[in-house]
Image (tube, rainbow, N blue to C red):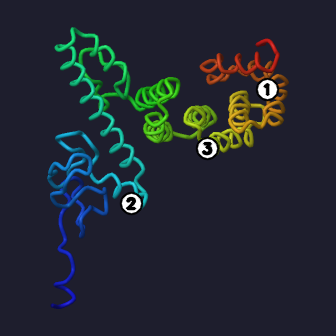
Amino acid sequence: MTEKSAKSPTVKCARCGEQSTGRFCSGCGAPLGEVSCEACGAKAPPGSRFCAECGATIGARAVAHAPRASGGRENIALMIAGAAVFTLVGFSIGQFLAKRSGGAAATEQVATTPLGPATGSAPDISQMSPQERASRLFNRVMSLSEQGKMDSARFFAPMAIQSYEMLGPVDAHVRYDIGEISVATGDVTRAKAEADTILAAKPKHLLGLVLAIRAAELTKDQASAEKFRRRLVSAEKAERATGLKEYDEHSRDIDEALKKAGASPG
């Protein structure tokens, strides 16, 4: 057998159209041929992202270990599309359960749809503005974190962060929102990095100081937390006078941090 004939044949990926060899697409990680679902054993056709029998992700491990593509927008599009599928599945199950239990189970199911409550139909992510999409994912992560569903919160966190990064220039406001997602999911390294970046550019930025306090509290570094509280109290009056939009939108966060510092909101 010659070297050329020993090579795996080149196959066009049914999902993204990439020409690849082997079992999985080198572009998107989709299976190039029929595979068995690792969760239930059902057969899945080439290009499948989810199992038609149990809804499990197909080729999840291959995708997780694939090299990070330079096209970040393609990555987030795939992730958001996956969230849309989960939303639709969740809504459909809720409708089925409603017929079986008079609506009580449906109410519970609606409360756990990935991008928020469904109102008669699953939300159409493709019709959302980038800001609305980011806000929906942010709220979803926060809600899951508050419910103690950390695995689910961490699943949606990368989607939420990438949605914010796609909004435009990553300014102090965006960095604070990303930092809040990181705090909610216990990613203290990312939270501290976002706070440090904000304060490096604007040492008195109130949201940068609030985020720095929360990052310090996550690591139980009370000395650093106290230092940032003193800086927050000292900067609050002059900074709020600047009328920054993010100060208005996150005034509650600032006020709560001031109260913990023993100061009254200005």
Under tag 1, what secondary structure?
A: helix
User: Mark on residue 190?
Assistant: 3
Mark toward the start of the polypeptide (3 vs 1): 3
Residue flagged by tag 1: what amino acid is it?
A: Leu
Q: Which dot, 3 or 1, sits closer to the camera?
A: 3
Q: Nearer the viewer, residue 168 or 102?
A: 102
Under tag 2, what secondary structure?
A: loop
Residue flagged by tag 3: what amino acid is it?
A: Arg
How far apart are labels 2 and 3 at the CA level? 22 Å
Q: Which dot, 2 or 1, sits closer to the camera?
A: 2
User: Mark on residue 66?
Assistant: 2
How far apart are labels 2 and 1 at the CA level? 43 Å
Q: Nearer the viewer, residue 55 or 114?
A: 55
Provide the residue designation for mark 1: 232
> Which residue does the image show at 52% across and 24% down from the upper left?
146
Left or right: 172, with 56 as reference point:
right
